[in-house]
Image: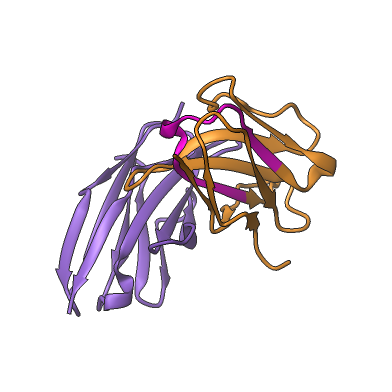
Amino acid sequence: GAGVSQSPSNKVTEKGKDVELRCDPISGHTALYWYRQSLGQGLEFLIYFQGNSAPDKSGLPSDRFSAERTGGSVSTLTIQRTQQEDSAVYLCASSLEGHRGAYGYTFGSGTRLTVV
Amino acid sequence: GENVEQHPSTLSVQEGDSAVIKCTYSDSASNYFPWYKQELGKGPQLIIDIRSNVGEKKDQRIAVTLNKTAKHFSLHITETQPEDSAVYFCAARGYGNNRLAFGKGNQVVVIP
């Protein structure tokens, strides 16, 4: 598609349940990022995938969070045993990495996760 | 790593006036500086960016200026309109780094 697609757009889950959030990046974009945005707050980096390199997981807040990217395209962010503090908008972005410079990200519209 | 700060956190302007948001960065090797606009319920959207070999860039009513010596860059919006009301994020990426460091965002409110 023309943009970054995220699904679902909204997710309500019970505390303790696992959730999976999906991101379809722009075709050909080699880099994929996950961010978290709590209400009225900035962008909190979670994880970054670049090509076949090992992902940068330095932003994951706990071992309940994990992500994978299959075939260098679609990515899934999994949150196990959800807690109320996990409630936030989860944003995915992709970019075209180049050897000669940096490029801006294209963000999806996000998944709004509510843990009740 | 890179640290980016934005000021002010909230900015209110009368419609038609100009708005300026300033960001500072810490890594003198940073070479790419994008600005994002986030409207309510949407993801951030890239509106303008500048590289370290350029001092200023304009696109219609928006412009970005870069001062490498002082390590700050600013977003300028002229002739503001109600649709400019949004949260604006600045970001910076250091040479050889692969991800952006974002500021905490500025809420811009354009008063009709």
How far from the left and from the top, in percent, is residue B95? Answer: 56, 36
- Give the residues drawn in magenta, as a range: A76-93
In the rendered structure, the answer to whether residue B19 lies left or right of residue B67 reads: left
Residue B28 visible (yes or no)? no
Residue at image location 72% in from the left, 43% down from the top: A75
Give above or below for A79 relative to B16: above
How far from the left and from the top, in percent, is residue B76? Answer: 29, 64
Q: Identify which residue, A58 or B90, lies in the foreground.
A: A58
Colour that chain B carries in the picture:
purple
Report the residue that reaches farthest toward the right.
A71
Colour that chain A carries in the picture:
orange
Residue at image location 17% in from the left, 80% down from the top: B112
Q: Quadrant of residue B21?
A: bottom left
Give above or below for A3 relative to B51: below
Asked if residue A81 is among those painted magenta in the image, a careful observer would answer yes
Q: Quadrant of residue A34?
A: top right
How far from the left and from the top, in percent, is residue A26? Answer: 71, 58
Residue at image location 38% in from the left, 63% down from the top: B40
Residue at image location 46% in from the left, 56% down from the top: B54
Give above or below for A26 relative to A75: below
Q: Identify which residue, A21 or B96, lies in the foreground.
A: A21
How far from the left and from the top, in percent, is residue A78? Answer: 64, 34
Asked if residue A86 is among those painted magenta in the image, a careful observer would answer yes
In the rendered structure, the answer to whether residue B94 lies left or right of residue A102 reads: left
